[in-house]
Amino acid sequence: MDIASDIPDSTDWLETSLKDFVQLESALHCQICKEFYNTPMVTSCSHSFCSRCIRTSLSADGRCPACRTPDQASRLRNNWALQEVVATFLAARPTAIRVARREQLEAQQAKRPGKRKRVVAGLDDVEEAGAGSRTTRSKSRKMAASQTSNPDVIEVDDSEDDDAYEPEAAADDGLVECPLGCGKRMKIEQVEPHLDRCEDEKQEVKKLTFRRPAQQSQRESERQSPRPQDRLAELNYSLLKEQPMRKKLEEIGIPAWGTKQLMVKRHTEWVNLWNANCDSNLPRSKRDLLQDLDSWERTQGGRAPTANAMSTNVMRKDFDGTGWANKNKDDFSRLIADARRKKEIEDTTSDPPKAEVEDDHPMPKMDGKENGSPHVDVPPITEPSALDSATSAPYADNTDAMASIRDKVEAANEGRHIEPLMNEDFRNTAFDTTSPISTPKHHDDDEYEQPVQGSQNEALLSEGLRSIRREVSGDDEHTRRQRTGSPCLMAAHLHNASTRQVPMFELPSEPVKDLDGAGEGTHF
Amino acid sequence: MTAPLPKRIIKETERLQSEPVPGISASPHDDNARYFDVMVEGPGGSCYEGGVFSLELFLPDDYPMCPPRIRFLTRIYHPNIDRLGRICLDVLKNNWSPALQIRTILLSIQALLGAPNPDDPLNEAVAKQWKARENQPEAIKTAREWTRLYANK
């Protein structure tokens, strides 16, 4: 069919005769993953989310995503009613949407009388479908369910039977319900011992009462597979040293390599996976869970590809700046030479508008960012755009802006001082207010204030880069920084005497291009 | 190894395209579905009215457990947006919740344009200008000027 049918979405109902179902279906979606609730859990603030989602969220944040009330994973409770609603809705959905679409089609055809006849003749059950969706929503859903031969469909009657079964039994057997609300019924003298192992028994109750709607055969196979029973406790990681932590991981049978930080992350992930599986009425085997953990490991854990091999290198504490400078000396010199040559060739006045425009130009494509690493140390957001600056000038048509820019450039090159339309911090001491170089810079200044990179690294970086700087002139350094993605310290950059002699908008566009091109490899 | 694109991102993208928010557009890059080009119109009645601001938005791997990274590409004179286009907005930081989404975040940003908050500034200088009563008309004028200069359609 169409693309939308690949991923069921509430908007699928928009093009049908059942437009109200958009809201119905969105109401059955978890706010976190935007999919149908999978083992919904209710928080102590009475919001519902998928077990896995809310556990991950709580371990990251400790607050309910909906209302920001602090909460704990141990206080989550299953929302079985919601789960059943989702299951029945999902079962009825394909037929319902098919019928609703067909009716919509019929309605459209009806507006064109010439075609109507043909359609009615072509589709045998159009009339029938039309009749169904003219009735109430629930009726049409029932009808949809009954029309299908799909064995997945759970008849509404069945689940009603289930609901009815429990209270009746309760009335007859003279038992009392577990005061902890696990749903288990027992003789009154059994309550006391039961309280101690309520959690365990809860699993059994779950199996007995709530798995009934599932297919018989599936249930059998599930019983045979090893089912995890006990929820894992969250650990107080700050109290655990590396070795005990490693032991703990080995005990529960998950990989125990890596730093403590990584082990903590892995353990958190595992606890969430495991406990969410305990919540589920169709738990999977430990092997499946380990596979999930492995895919986590490869995408977000210890085996995740580093976002930028070079940047992580540079960010390392023991980064050997001098060695790095020596190793790449050839490259640097070549780039410097390129930049110098370019500078000689370039006509100073032809460049300025581009330089200015660059600020507002969308970033070049973030090559390789889709590699999916969690450690996006240098995310696209902060990468300065230089790639397209020479080839596109989105403001070229804007005469006002261009005129104003040209004025500024002229003024700057003649040494006049124009009051920039700029805020005060351009006059802070790190800037030379008379130096025109500070005015046009906007996003170009990224390097010295990389928003995502830890400031604690800047000192180290500057240490490592100092040796490089010795042989690099002002603007070359600038471009080289773009390549390494490392922060460029503003003060050093702007105080460099040679910078001031560069005409305001002189931009080494050619070398920048080269650098970026060469830099692509460095992302991975 | 490429992290699988979560369904949530696909759904959000689809919804942004099929039911766009008025005055806001967000389209993913072809080669990186986590990276969006965003256009936000300045809200009517504000000093950014008539401007179309471009932003970039990136969904990190642990999205939706952590907020999207977002920043203005267009220059803007605003007490909560600094020279690098970074935005000071609670929901992008501490108050992020996985129940939020791209759509709601962009709406918050548009609302921030309509209601600058100089009491919690990111750009001290602009905020100072904005806060001082006698300077405020001046600040608003500058904001208009910048909108005309940089955020033209």
Image (spheres, rainbow, N blue to C red):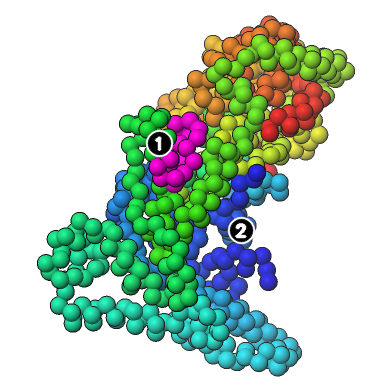
Q: Residues within 10 Å of mark 2 (few under 14, many from 20)?
A: some
Asked whether A253 falls inside the magenta stretch, the response is yes
Left of B112 or right of it: where is A335?
right
Q: Which quadrant, please, contains the C terminus of chain A?
A: top right
Per the rendering, the mark at residue A247 is 1
| Chain to which mark 2 belongs | B
**Toward which corner of the image does residue B132 lie, by quadrant?**
top left
Task: Examine the rendered structure and indicate whether residue A492 appears above or below residue A520.
Answer: above
Q: Could you tell me which secondary element the residue under label 1 belongs to? A: helix
Residue A97 seen in render: yes
Which of the chains bears the disc numbered 1? A
Residue drawn at x 80%, y 26% as measured from the top left: A514
Residue located beneath label 2 in the image: B14
Local SS, label 2: helix
Name the kind of residue labelled 1 in the image. Lys
The prevailing secondary structure element of the residues shown in magenta is helix
Between A109 and A177, the one nearer to me in the picture: A177
In this orientation, does residue B134 appear? no
Q: Nearer the viewer, residue B132 or A321?
A: A321
Residue type beneath disc 2: Glu
Q: Is residue B46 left or right of residue A267?
A: right
